[in-house]
Amino acid sequence: MNLNESGRRMLDDCRRLVLPYSVRSQLNVQAGDELYVFSNCEEKIVLTKKSNGKDSSSIIVDELGRVTLPKELCTTLELCEQDSFEVTAVPEDGAIILYLAEKARG
């Protein structure tokens, strides 16, 4: 796996996360695009433009490059405001990977 572009981003109080411009441009992700959300562990969330047909939710990229993580996912993974993610583009897989980098204290 070639991890080409990345950046650290923080979850806000509305469950939103800004996808870095470099990550969005590498995968041609634009405002209005629908992304599918998958997670099979507590430390990694995968966003893709294609659904795997099971266990996925869809989210829309807003005009500022933000995505809002589904409430059910945040509850299941016990995510909260100010949790920090390493956001990485994986072009050969057509995916954006959100690695939980740091849990907020509190």
Image (cartoon, grey):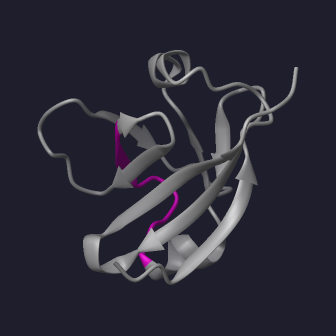
How many numbered discs? 0
Q: Range of the magenta residues?
A: 27-39
Specify the farthest residue to the right. 106
Q: What percent of the width, then of the height, locates residue 35?
A: 37, 49
Where is 17 relative to 4, above or below?
A: above
Q: Is residue 31 magenta?
A: yes
Rendered residue at 47%/78% (across/down): 3
Which residue occupies the foreground of this view, 63 or 46?
Answer: 46
Rendered residue at 30%/70% (across/down): 94
Which residue occupies the foreground of this view, 96 or 16?
Answer: 96
| Residue 66 as seen in the image, left or right of residue 4 | right
Where is 13 relative to 3, above or below?
A: above
Rendered residue at 51%/41% (across/down): 43
Rendered residue at 52%/58% (across/down): 31
Q: What percent of the width, then of the height, locates residue 66?
A: 63, 50
Where is 92 relative to 8, above or below?
A: below
| Residue 94 as seen in the image, left or right of residue 20 | left
Q: Quick one: quadrant of the C terminus?
A: top right
Q: What percent of the width, then of the height, locates residue 67?
A: 56, 44
Specify the farthest residue to the left. 53
Q: What percent of the width, then of the height, locates residue 1?
A: 34, 78
Quarter assignment of residue 15: top right
Q: Is residue 99 magenta?
A: no
Which residue occupies the foreground of this view, 78 or 25?
Answer: 78
